[in-house]
Image (spheres, rainbow, N blue to C red):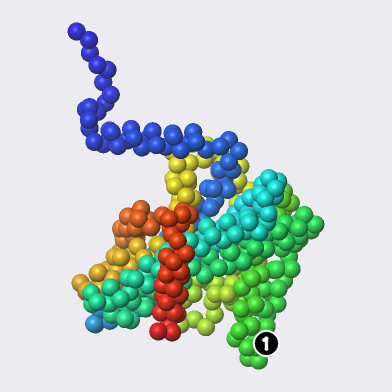
Amino acid sequence: MTTEPSTGAPPGNPVSLLRSRARTAVRALDARTPAHRDRAIDGLRALALLAVPTGHWLLGGFARDADGTLHNASPLTALGFLAPASWLLQTLGIFFLVGGHSSVLSLRRTTARGGSTARWLGGRVARLGRPVLGVTAVWAVLIPLLHDLGVSTATLRTGATLVIQPLWFVGIYAVLTALTPYCAAAARKLGVWSAVPLLVSVAAVDFLRYGPFAAAVPSWLSLLNLLPGWLFAYQLGVCWGERRLGRRTAWGLLCGGAALFAALLLYFHYPASMVGVPGQDRTNSHPPSLLVLALAAAQSGAAVLLRDRLARLLRRPALWAPVVVINLSAMTILCWHQTAMLAAAVPASFAGAVPGLTTVPDTLGWFAARLAWLPVFAALLVLIGSVTRRFEAPWTGAGRGRRAVAAVLAAAFAVFALGYA
């Protein structure tokens, strides 16, 4: 009689089968990754992406009225000492850094194959635009349906505002992508010094709007920081891709950015939070202030210095697999993470005061309860993303008529979210 070798788990054990399939999938993802793939860049992008929903879920809450209406609220209003958490969760500097690095290399590969810059840009913008059009069109359909189910107009406007707020990033990113050829030319000629005029420009606008002449400066002047403020880290990324940003410069960015960050907080009294806080008359991110650029410089320097170490870590299949999944679902995460939170909060608003969800975020108890809600939000995002990720793929089956309808629905949602309806 022969005996089968023991596997440590009964044949057909669901847990054992699940683990076996997971290991097989992980190994398959690793095997399909081209040898030339820069795993560190993908890893940095994944970290920056995950920080977006984590930051919004932790630093954004709701206040519920007696009639069940939800309004946006922030725990930083009452718990200002939590502001340093926003320094870790505000990773747009890394995202734009990686974006600049990836874009310049992608453009170089396209032109080397004989492709045109215009066609390259059209493809990049389409990849950004499809998911945005999808989420806004879907929400345009959901709003009247939810209203018929008893959700108040005020709650729907709160939700629409949350959904549309992260989408500003896509418009800015599209503009920066269009500037990639010019950024590359500047990087080749000036190296990392090509980013300095952007820093000086933001500093000048900050001086005008916060300095001794602030009372005479129109409020719209701050909008001049939008382009140079976000282009700064993108230009550093282009310099990195053009091999004009090495370790020595990275140390300078890390130390110089950290020093400037500390000086702006301690001596120039910039707000400590990297996100907007209701009731404060100054904000760092909308539009970006010099503090955002200081943080982006430090983050960029750290990213360059840690690149090789991160690449070695991501040679492990178990660490590389989630990075691949996150990168493949980048726009889905960005566009739908607020919907995942609302999918829990809106039904809960009918139940009353639910700790960490519909209660005012003004205690450490709320913060602890919100931490417990994060896995629920993540699970809802995975569920929603399994259906909506199709918006990231080319819309080969959609004719011009359907695309026009989607565009009209998206425009209607934007009008509602911005308070014009």
From the viewer's side, name the closer residue of 18 and 215. 18
Residue 232 lies, in percent from the top left, at 66, 64
Residue 52 lies, in percent from the top left, at 47, 61
Does residue 124 appear to the left or right of 202 in the view shown?
left
Quadrant where the C terminus sits is bottom left
At 58% from the left and 41% from the top, the residue drawn is 37
Q: Compared to 13, does 83 lie above or below?
A: below
Residue 114 lies, in percent from the top left, at 70, 48
- Residue at the top extreme of this rendering: 1
| Quarter of the image where one finds residue 2 | top left
Residue 387 lies, in percent from the top left, at 35, 55
At 58% from the left and 67% from the top, the residue drawn is 172
Q: Is residue 170 visible?
A: yes
In the image, what residue type sits under mark 1?
Answer: Pro
Near mark 1 (Cα within 10 A), the count class, few <14, some 14-19 or many ≥20, is: few
Does residue 249 appear to the left or right of 154 in the view shown?
right
